[in-house]
Image (tube, rainbow, N blue to C red):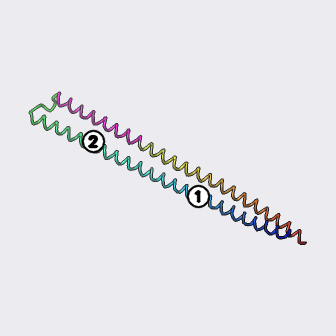
Amino acid sequence: MAEVAAIAAMVGSVASVATAVSGAQAAQRSGRIQMQQAQVQAAQYADQREQVAQQAGREEADRLTQLRRTLGAVEALRGARGLAGDSVGAGVIAAANTETANRDLDTITLNSEREKRMLGLAGSRALLSGQAAQTEASNRALAGYGQAVQSGATFANQGYKFLSSIT
């Protein structure tokens, strides 16, 4: 009867080893998957940063085009009225339009930089989250392998007892 109990304990130990190893491998896979997902998310944030920079460049170019058109229209209107090219009023209007355009360009740049910084931080957070998940998964895997070793030791102990009891 003791032999049957020893064999049952050995079978249980083998099952525990298999379960522990399987759980450890699943934890490692989970950590790798979470890290890959974090890398994909960080790449998406990097793409969005590039899109923000491109959009800011387009907005700046559009604003400069608008300024040139406005200054050209002011110059044409002045010329159509027969005003001198160096009139004070024309200079004031041109300076005001240029100043407004420069403020607009500064605002576009500041908003773009702020958004790019936020996206960069979000990408960094995604990577850190993935690294933390991978570390946690590695810790779970190590615990699982430790359990497997413990179960293997139990198996060896039960095997030794079984062999000792039949000799």
Q: Position of residue 115 (x, y in %)?
A: 41, 43
SS type, badge 2: helix
Q: Which secondary structure type mostly characterizes the magenta part of the structure? A: helix
**Residue at (20, 39) in percent of width and height:** 70
Q: Where is residue 167 in the image (x, y as percent from the top left)?
A: 90, 72
The label nearer to you, 2 versus 1, is 1
Disc with the residue nearer the chain's start (2 vs 1): 1
Give the residue at mark 1: 30
Report the magenta residues as a range. 88-114
Q: Is residue 10 above or below residue 115?
A: below
Mark pair 2, 1: CA separation: 49 Å
Q: Which amino acid does label 2 sit on?
A: Arg
Question: Relative to 7, is 94 on the left or the right?
Answer: left
Q: In this view, does 27 lie above or below 82?
A: below
Give the residue at mark 2: 63
**Residue at (9, 33) in percent of width and height:** 82
Q: In which quarter of the image is residue 114?
A: top left
Q: In which quarter of the image is residue 67?
A: top left
Q: What residue type is labelled 1?
A: Ser
SS type, badge 1: helix
Residue placed furthest toward the top:
88
Residue placed furthest toward the right:
167
Residue placed furthest toward the front:
1
Residue 96 falls inside the magenta stretch: yes
Question: Relative to 88, is 118 on the left or the right?
Answer: right
